Image (cartoon, helix red, strand yellow):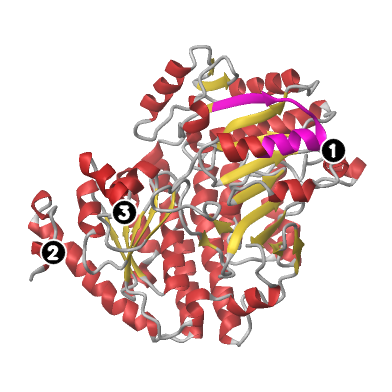
Amino acid sequence: MSTTQTHPVDDEITKEVRANLDRAIADLTVGADSWSRLGLDQRATLITETQASIARHANDWVAAAIAAKGTHEGSMEGEEWISGPYASLAGFGRVAHSLTLMAKGESPLSGVKAQSAPGGRIRFKVLPSSLLEYTLFHGFTGEVWLKPGVPEDQARGEAGLGALRVGENGGVGLVLGAGNIASIGPLDVLYELVAFNRASVLKLNPTFAGLTEAYSAAFKPLIDANLLRIVNGAAKVGGYLTQHPGIAHVHITGSAVTHDAIVWGTGATASANREAGTPVLDKPISSELGGVSPTIIIPGKWSKADLKFQAEQIATQRLQNSGHNCIATQTLILSAEWKQKEEFLAELRRVFDRLPRREPWYPGSDRKMDAARSSYPQAEDHSGRLLIEVSEATSRDLFATEYFSPVLGHTALAGTGAEFFQAAVEFANTELDGTLGASIAVAPKDKRAIKDFDEILAGLRYGSIGVNAWSAVAFLGAPFTWGAFPGNTLEQVGSGIGVVHNAHLIDNTERSVIYGPFRTFPRSVLHGENSLFPRPPWFVTARTAHRSGAKLSAFAAKPSWLKLPGIFADAFRG
């Protein structure tokens, strides 16, 4: 039986398109077989060559992403550098290092310190990994936590995933790329290759069709090795590929609605298929699907500068990329007893108001914003950004709807200290949709006062947690895992199934935890408890982010002490 006779959607796309897709899968089938026979040193070389190619074409990549989004000139362009080439260069570089270690007979976790974590867990300290990294990311540390009961020795021995199984052919996978952040698709392709020995068809979201040429140049080494093909098209092309017999696995970054349509079908048959447990998708699927991310504000006595810095931090968590992030904070959980609650919200309003007006660009954003206004007629409009108080007297739609646009809600719970923290964790776990990422803001002295802080944090069921840092830093950092908290199923997919990134190739992971400074310079000089460095370049208030982002990308391509002064000089001007 021919390929064209096996697909119910064949009559919806042209014969030429079908032929091109079939040819791409055939080429990748050959590439996956060749990859299975490559030694680890050869794999590391290919990944390193691809990293160098990304660096050579980074300017074109950023220019294409800016054009796709209509990003304002100046500092906002830094978003495209940091979330595009920088994240990709860091990811490819760290994976190449892991493969190089394995080629020498060492674990990818060689030299990475481990310690116990609450609940019978082990955590590996993956940031910083060197003195150079310590200097660049001063004030930031990060860990990858294992699932309860997994011993350290087992984790070190099993680190490597697909790279432990040279000779294994994972076939061809389909990566349905996101349309909001330009490194998502490439990094998903990388993980498919090294963790599962799969070549990939990367189907671009229509919003990123304009990046095709830049991607094709940047990832030419993988394309030449028949390990990657980049295709465009709408839902019909995606439907053809998901049902193609040459595709062994599907990975999607997007919405639960799209995931469920792929898995269960659409219309009246979807419910019947779900009830019967008979998905229409005949192959495994992994996913990253977003949700309603919280930030917990633990009350304390904050200075004016503390309030200002944390307001900028929260504004960044919601407004970066015009709010079109699956990990954007959508719900602030505040203490009703915090004496500075209104003062903090007033500072947050000031940040919202003084930022340049920026229209949402992602398709459908206008409908999401209208839905928020409809559910919350009392919403405050700050230069097109909505700030909404959610209480017992209002709709609770904000807790269950990912608006994927500049909509930020806040709600208040009783208590202070450990009592409040525990209540906020319970609220985040039970009242909010999704488990992708959560953040916490807490002054050092207030954190120390909560004696069981780590134990309470361990109860927060999210795949990435940021303590005085946006949980999205885990996305930017190559060694961290990226994905929902474990436990979702096809029937109840939540924020998705599986992880990506994970450059140490660790098995049995549960979450990543990132710690940042409560506030940057100059408080640290006086109190010795915060970073000596300025606001991070991913802050929406960083005025030199475009220059810092370009220099960070050059650093990620080829780390060097000589590049640090230029990065810091721009950052301090921001």
Residue at 52%, 19% (x, y): give it.
383
Q: CA distance from mark 1 to mark 3?
A: 48 Å
For image coordinates 42% across by 67% down, the residue present is: 192
Q: Quadrant of the N terminus?
A: bottom left
Give the mark nearer the N terminus: 1 vs 3: 3
Residue 306 location, x and y as percent? Answer: 79, 32
Query: Toward the viewer: 182 or 213?
Result: 182
Q: Residue at x 42, y 71 (%)?
A: 193
Q: Amino acid at mark 3?
A: Gly
Q: Is residue 522 visible?
A: no
Earlier in the chain: of badge 3 and badge 2, it is: 2
Q: Nearer the viewer, residue 96 or 573?
A: 96
In the image, is residue 407 above or below residue 266?
above
Give the answer, above or below, for where 43 lies relative to 504: below
Is residue 248 depicted above or below 436 in this figure? below
Q: Is residue 125 left or right of residue 547?
A: right
Q: Quadrant of the C terminus?
A: top right
Query: Circle 3 is placed at which residue position?
Result: 277
* Amino acid type, residue under disc 2 in the picture: Ala
| Residue 374 visible in the picture | yes
Q: Position of residue 514 (x, y in %)?
A: 68, 52
Q: Circle 2 sits in a helix, a strand or a loop, which is it?
A: helix
Q: Which residue is mark 2?
A: 19
Say few, some or many: other residues with alpha carbon within 10 Å of mark 3 (under 14 / 14 to 19 / 20 or more).
Answer: few
Q: Which label was assigned to residue 446?
A: 1
Residue 53, quarter of picture:
bottom left
Label 2, residues with CA under 10 Å away: few <14, some 14-19, many ≥20: few
